[in-house]
Structures are given as structure tokens and as C-alpha cells.
Image: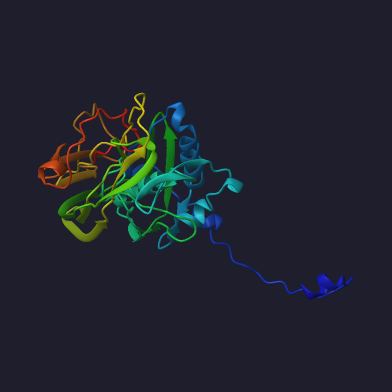
Amino acid sequence: DTALRRGDAEFEGVVGAVPAKRTAAALGKVEVTDVLGYFETKYASDNAHIDRTYNLRMASSKLDGHVILPGETFDFNEVVGPRSEAYGYRVATVIAQGELVDGIGGGTCQVSGTLHGAAFFAGLDIVERKPHTRPSGYIKMGMDATVVYPTITLKLKNPLPYPVVLHEVVDHGVVRAEILGPKRTRDVTFVRRIDGITPFREKEISDPKIPEGEKVLAQRGIPGFKVTRYRVVRDGAYAVRERIPDYYPPTAQIVRVGTGPKDSSFRPVDDNHSEYVADELLTISQGPSIRSPKAGGPERGGGTVEARVPGKYGSYGWTVREGLTTEWTREPKPADADNPGID
């Protein structure tokens, strides 16, 4: 560097050999005849969400076809890279400090969460994964995986004796992630139990743009959830169970209180997210010995079945019944399909 800055015509350089992370010999052994695990989430594909859909496709394209060798650890941020305008990402809704706001690269967490679900059911090691600061409507609580470049990432390790390949596509309102490899032999079960809740606080903010005497629900509150997750991996006569705790902090309910002049033409518009409901106990099983309820024939990667116990939190009106809030009776706007408020 010093010689270049001085403008020297000649200088001595040091050359070193850097071994390749992947060799042709290793990649030549990759087999993708079966799906070892898969997971799907839905997204809104209308024109109002075109930028978010673009971000979904952008991030998924970085993952698709990536090979994880035996014993290797995959890092989402390392593979997908920065999410910024310079890298082609657009502005869409993100979760920041428990609130929904606009941000560059909105939608990337749906890509990481869907991949986490596929890796979970494939039996990959979840080395690093962080839940959101509030539940997301597009994915079941306990399956999400938030990512923020470069500080928060998703890391997966391949514990299998052969390479696996990531496959993720975004099409027709569905994000689907698959972990590809040789013939699948293991059934995997996800169990999620809600152990308790933390009430949300209600915050009133004076707003001169709203007529005096009027109130607007600017953000619907979501209680905090203390959750225990289990993963049971069965391979023949053997089974391994993992226990993973999760916590989602409460999201404040924000009410804007009018202090402005009377206006007979004023029409209040409340937060369009419905009350968040989640089954107290949820079980999802996937694998070659399982048949999906509506399957018409063999399923690549096996079938998936769900069992639900709604309990206290699994039906609408539960936050009112539990005394966490009062009921807002105004007709809400049509729900945002990316955040419908249901688990």
C-alpha cells in the first residue's frame, strides 16, 4: 500500500495460496433426490405489497442453491449480504422496537423465518436464532427468525454426514423453503406451549390533527408471551428431544386522543391488525411416515399434520375476557394479509 501511494514504478509483492471453501470433489457428491424438511408461509401479493414481494424474491434468490457441507455452519447475513438500497432492496414494513414501521429490506425476516422452519423439520442444528420483538402474522409463534444486517442473524449447522442444499422460492403468495438431500428417513415434531402472558400497557398520545372528543387506535396492543418449544426427531427406534424457551415482549397499545377543533367530516381509522390469537398448545409433525390430511398421493419429503388446543389464547376476544383491554367496536379496515393477527 505504501509503495502504491508513493507511486513507485516497481515493488515486491507477497503471494499466498488461499484454500477453496468448497472443492469440486465435495460438491460432486451432492445428492438432492429428496426433501429433508420444508416449510411455507404466505404473503400478500397485491400491488400494495409489491415492494415487499420484491424484497422477498431478492433475499430468497441469494439462498437458493446454497450448499451446506457436513459440519459446516450457514450464516444468513453472510450469504444474503446487506439489505440496503445500494444492493437493490426497497422500502417495506419492518418490525422495530415492537412497532411496525417502514424500513429498507422489509420482508427479509419472512425469508429467514421460512428457512428456519424448513431447517427445523430437516433436523439441522439451530446454532443461532432470535425471535421477533412481537409475533408475526405470517408465521407461527416460535418458528420466526429475525435478521438485521449485520448484527442479528440466523445460523444453521449441518450435522448430517452428507451435504444439503437450500431451495427457497417466492411465488403466488407463498414462500416455500426446502432442505434438499438424499432419501429422508426422519420424522420431526414441533411442539409449542404458551406458559404465560405479560399484559401490554396502553399509552395515550394527544393529537391536534384529531378532533377533540375523538380517539383513534393507532396501534393494537399485543401481550407478551412466554413460550416453550420442543423438537422431537425420530429416526427408526431412536428419538431425540430438544427444549427451547422463547419470549416475546408485550407491544404497547397506542391510542391517539384528539385535541383539535371539531370536524363533522372526521372519520376515524383504527389499526387494521386484528387481535392476536395463538393456540395454547400447538403440535406440527412432518416426515416420511406422516400423511397430510388432503394428500392425494405420495408427498416428496413426507406429509405434515397439525394438532391444536386453543386454550385461553386461541379465540378472538380473549384479551377482553382476560381483562387486558376494552373492546374496540368500530369496524376495522380490511386486515393486512402479511400481519393478520392470527397464529
Please name the residue shown 24% across and 26% down the image. 296
Residue 181 seen in the current view: no
Residue 277, image x, y percentages: 20, 41
Residue situated in front as seen by the camera: 210 or 223 = 210
Q: Image quarter for residue 286?
A: top left
Residue situated in front as seen by the camera: 194 or 293 = 194
Tell me how the rendering is colored. Answer: rainbow
Residue 53, image x, y percentages: 46, 35
Please name the residue shown 39% across and 40% down the image. 208
185 relative to 246, above or below: above
* Residue projecting furthest to the top: 265
Q: Quadrant of the C terminus?
A: top left
Please name the residue shown 26% across and 32% down the image. 298
Question: In the displayed structure, does residue 246 sit left or right of residue 150?
Answer: left
328 relative to 222, above or below: above
Question: In the displayed structure, does residue 91 sit left or right of residue 86?
Answer: left
Q: Quadrant of the N terminus?
A: bottom right
Residue 129, image x, y percentages: 35, 58
Q: How many labels does the image show?
A: 0
Residue situated in front as seen by the camera: 288 or 227 = 227
* Residue projecting furthest to the front: 261
333 relative to 155, above or below: above
Residue 284 seen in the current view: yes
Residue 244, image x, y percentages: 23, 60
Question: In the displayed structure, does residue 138 sit left or right of residue 105?
Answer: left
